[in-house]
Image: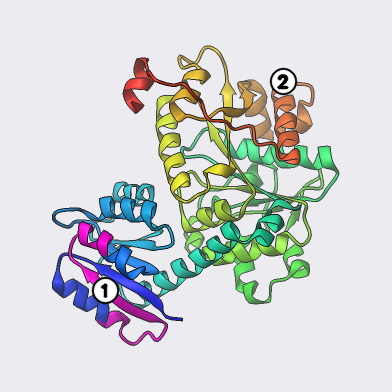
Amino acid sequence: MAIKILIVDDITETRENIKRLLYFEKDMMVVGEASDGDEAVRQTQKLNPDIVLMDINMPTSDGITATQEISLKYPKTAIIIMSVQGEQEYLKKAMVAGAREYMVKPFSTDELVDTIRRVCDFEKRRRIHLTEPSMVKELQRDPQIITVFSTKGGVGKTSIATNLAISLAEETRKKVVIMDLDLQFGDVAVMLNIIPKRTITEIIQDINQLDSELLEGYLISHPTGVKVLPCPTRPEYAELITGAHVEKIMGVLKQNYDYIVIDTPHYFHETTLTALDLCHQILLVVSLDLPTIKNVKLGLEVLDSLHLKGKVKLILNRSAEDMGIKHEDMEENLNMKIAAHIPSDGRTVVSSLNKGDPFVMTHPNTKITESIRELARMVMIGEVKLSRVSGVNEKKGLLGRLFG
């Protein structure tokens, strides 16, 4: 069945060029056009397209506004933003509004066609996960995939991920693997004092033949028994790895491992979105400072637009009473309860990082280690300790002014 496409752009010549690019694609069909955002919404209701190719800058109603409305009213339609603006700020706005992909003009036929097919395929898999009862049951069974994510760097995400993986292995005596998806600057290998001989980069060369036996040869064993799949050794290699590669690797890992911990970068990327979509629990690491809280609020909006917020558990790292912001204020402004508190213990953590020995091994009797064990138990039993904060009518102070 052909992919139904609606083209939205205020320039007639641009719409005609896009139609020409898609003309010879037998699995795609342009079902309509629109010249502004309001018309795009009406045409989406009328034509029920699979994909909307949406320009950002248009008169009357812009593409971001139209994207938000279509995402809310017609969630079965996926939106790909087209723009001459390649800045990160435009990308963030598009994703918050509900766009699935962002393309910078001009683009080639191959880029356009590949993006449409990838987004369409991703949406089909998403609907299966969200609507098929059998698939939902499958997701709720072991093995458990836990994605550790943050919307800002420097909050201790990788430290939590590595120590959590080791704690899960100790608490459960089951098979645990940690996958470093911070593909440019991941630190999992460094924090576990491992020198990678083979990484995820080499795996994708054998991706079509990949099975559990072959994948096992790429994993590195840590003394605790935890297996490690390191990130590429060079930042430029990150571009070689796609969401489809990550999905394949995760599927094979599920055949042999009970817990799969995934460390991610602090931004939304195709590979990160794949991990967030396919995992069972998202541990969103936060800290009590305004830039982090601002980014977390934006990140939660993106996750909500992707229907992933139900998986999220807020993990407060470096929790202390003297930070200038109370955690209750953060909960109130994010409208979400903190699921776990990791206390501040700079001396233990820094010493652990510099030696490459996780603190759950070297400092087993500290409060920070106990908090990681509690986090592991929470993950093990799958308790969702999230609840909406009700009765919030007034926001006071700096946080209230910032997010009100």
Q: Nearer the viewer, mark 1 or mark 2?
A: 1
Q: Residues within 10 Å of mark 1 (few under 14, many from 20)?
A: some
| Residue situated furthest front in the rendering | 46
Q: Nearer the viewer, residue 168 or 360?
A: 168
Give the Cα separation between the discs numbered 1 and 2. 61 Å
What is the residue that sits farthest to the right in this orientation?
173
Q: Quadrant of residue 39?
A: bottom left
Numbered disc 2: secondary structure: helix
Q: Disc 1 marks which residue?
A: 32
Residue at 63%, 26% (x, y): give it: 342
Q: Residue 367 — which label?
A: 2
Is 304 left, or right, of 359 in this rendering? left
Q: Do tag 1 and tag 2 residues touch (Cβ < 8 Å)? A: no
User: Is residue 27 within the magenta segment?
Assistant: yes
Task: Report the residue at 79% width, 26% height from top.
Answer: 364
Residue 365's tag is none
Type of residue at label 2? Lys
Which region is colored magenta?
20-42
Kindly tell me whether residue 122 is visible in this rendering.
yes
